[in-house]
Image: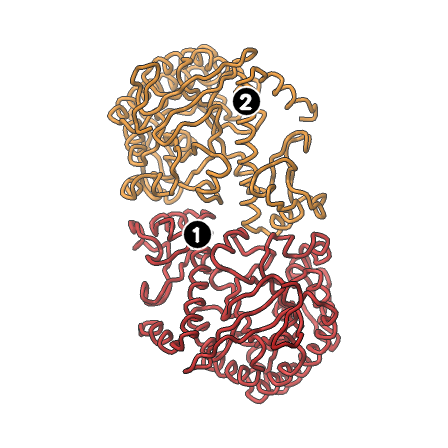
Chain colours: A red, B orange
Amino acid sequence: MTGKNFFGGIFTGAVTYELIHKDKFSQARAGILHTPHGDFLTPIFMPVGTQATVKTLSPEELEQLGAGIILSNTYHLFLRPGAELIKKAGGLHKFMNWSKGILTDSGGFQVFSLGELRKISEDGVTFRSHIDGAKKFLSPEVSVEVQKNLGSDIMMAFDECIPYPADYDYAKKSTERTHRWAERSLAAAKSSLTQGIFGICQGGMYEDLRMESAKVIGTMDFDGCAIGGLSVGEPKDLMYKMMEISVQYLPENKARYFMGLGTPQDLMECVGRGVDMFDCVFPTRVARNGMAMVSPKTSPRGRLVMKNSEFTEDFSPIENNCDCYACKNNFTRAYIRHLVRTDEIFGLRLLTLHNLRYLQKFMSDMRNAILEDRFKDFRADFFSDENL
Amino acid sequence: MTGKNFFGGIFTGAVTYELIHKDKFSQARAGILHTPHGDFLTPIFMPVGTQATVKTLSPEELEQLGAGIILSNTYHLFLRPGAELIKKAGGLHKFMNWSKGILTDSGGFQVFSLGELRKISEDGVTFRSHIDGAKKFLSPEVSVEVQKNLGSDIMMAFDECIPYPADYDYAKKSTERTHRWAERSLAAAKSSLTQGIFGICQGGMYEDLRMESAKVIGTMDFDGCAIGGLSVGEPKDLMYKMMEISVQYLPENKARYFMGLGTPQDLMECVGRGVDMFDCVFPTRVARNGMAMVSPKTSPRGRLVMKNSEFTEDFSPIENNCDCYACKNNFTRAYIRHLVRTDEIFGLRLLTLHNLRYLQKFMSDMRNAILEDRFKDFRADFFSDENL
């Protein structure tokens, strides 16, 4: 694709979502996301490459394990090395040697996480860098400008991620401002024919605000819609409920993206309710903490803590039927345990490769189940272990 | 090769050295080291894989950059995960998935570096683990037993690395004990048809002891001879002098191995005096400190400190004619600088790949120069920059 995509015969911008099949017995859907750097099957999980690298991995390894789009962070790249530098390098794809899709967040989430270090106004957010304390400013216009310099396939609108808990009045005012910022983000992005932009709906933990926000963002001229402000510390039930409401009011012809979600269980629940895209540091972060993600059939809790003594003389791979680099080449649990215990980087690489491949395979299995209208069985089978 | 090698028609064990050509105008020599896991061209540099992994790299990457033999550390593997475990795993090659050569040191150097934590007797060395303080014992017999469990291609005799400075009397007594330990190491190793063993000559910084030790070790039934106890803090001139004496009295039909040496300058000086084998953590350690090794023509001191601001907008590879993974795929200096500044593991990988490839290429260039009797020109050209 070269920045021009057609959906149902109507020109809709650089990024479009094509619905392929809806599961007959759930809201789960299989689709294709068309982007300037390739077409990607959904539901999709996007590995996180915060600093223009998915931690520990090479671009080839990422591609080999099946990654299609990665997420990179505007906030971090804005501070280091700076978006102008990356523009000079030929854009983020070229800077980091990644030829497939890149989605950049808007920096909103990170900036709002700074707490005392930031100040919000209608115009945008003034904050101090967590690195050197330098005063910085992000707004819808600045964020989009930065993302244009990065040259990502999918830009994200600048929003406020409402903390949990937040009172109704704050959540309402913040959500309304996010809507105004969405309009400004869209206006700033419009000139691009080679980058798409997604809006982000908010609404805190209030049903009417969630509904309203999904409607407002869903009717704007975005190329996709993200559900923001969830997985911020609220109970799971509440998260699923808010997500369900949001999805319900989002348009069917655009991709739906749940930001910052991560465990297989969560992905399954959201896909079953009609979400298409995910990103999370979970698989890569737990890998660096020495944890392997496995099927609940391999281990009831779906994870192996590799440094545990039970693996001392375990010469089997992390998971028997896994086709990841580590398992396929029979790097054993005993060897990986040794590497983790001795703080060897290669151990973190093996676990990162395994975990990301595990999730890619999981997404692709879900997609196949959707295409064959057996998502409910797939889900029931996955959750069959009551220890999960 | 399958553990049986012939040299000049006489069976000499699992590992043999074949002299191919001696440079006409220096002592430099090109040869082939025959081992159970392949034949390797000398002079050779062996990357260090202390904990059964060359830090940050996969076995495939090591092979692709041209590594033939790697060194692994008996002391470290003895403590963690334990040599019996590695034996159960099928040996070190299988444990770490490395199909080419492995040389294991004897643990002597590490044990003697423990200082207060160890006690030497004629029998061996009692020491406390640097990890948990557990009391351990290494002797010629134990060290060889451990190395047999590891299954390395080349085992090393157990020796004492004499500290610098050391008085004559201490150096003499220690060297004589090293000789007795060499006999015991050899006796313990003899039953193996699939592993070779190298002796290590010592002698401190005393000419007569160096000469004597080289003669004694050189006439024992070892498959190769190492020069130990150098590069321990003494001035360069003294190191070269002691090395020269040692080499002079070592047999021509066995490989000569200078333990723990590492910079291109040092390798060049030793090769020019007839040394064949080297190992050092230098290229991998400085990589993890953000340093790239380059030709003196690229940078007078032969190194680039990648975090320096001069590379901020430098979109060229580390070195223009380098065929390492990083340079070949045009990971730019600017990108690597960014990765180093943000403590990203992929930056350490790229620099490790580059530095090891740089050294492999350097060794292979030296070998070609030797084969064509132009080693002296090669050396003069390398040292032409007076800032070096």
Element type at mark 1: helix
Q: Position of residue B201 (x, y in %)?
A: 41, 19
Which residue position is annotated with label 1?
Answer: A350
The chain under label 2 reads: B
Placement of A286 over or under B180, stated as above or below? below
- The one of A374 and A50 positioned closer to us in this rendering: A374
Q: Quadrant of the N terminus of chain A?
A: bottom right
Left or right: where A58 falls relative to B256: right
| Residue B206 rendering spot, x and y as whole percentages | 47, 14
Q: Is residue B371 left or right of residue A143?
A: left
Badge 2 density bin: few <14, some 14–19, many ≥20, Cα 10 Å: some
Which residue is painted at 44% across and 64% down in the image? A359
Where is residue B301 shown, x and y percent of the image? 66, 31
Percent across and percent down for residue A352 are 46, 56
When the figure is inspected, residue A340 is found, relative to residue B369, above or below; the finding is below
Where on the picture, by quarter, is residue B199?
Answer: top left
Q: Is residue B32 left or right of residue A228?
A: left
Image quadrant for the C terminus of chain A? bottom left
Tell me the tag on residue A360.
none
Query: In this rendering, would B186 be left or right of A249?
Result: left
Residue A71 visible to the viewer: yes
For the residue carrying disc 1, how many other residues have a C-alpha within 10 Å: few (<14), some (14-19), or many (20+)?
Answer: many
Furthest toward the front, the residue is: A9
Residue identified by numbered label 2:
B368
Q: Amino acid at mark 2?
A: Asn
The correct choice, above or below, for B311 with respect to B366 in the image is: below
Q: Amino acid at mark 1?
A: Leu
Question: Which residue is more in the foreground, B266 or A97?
Answer: A97
Going 56% across and 20% down the picture, which residue do you hit? Answer: B369
Q: Quadrant of residue A381?
A: bottom left
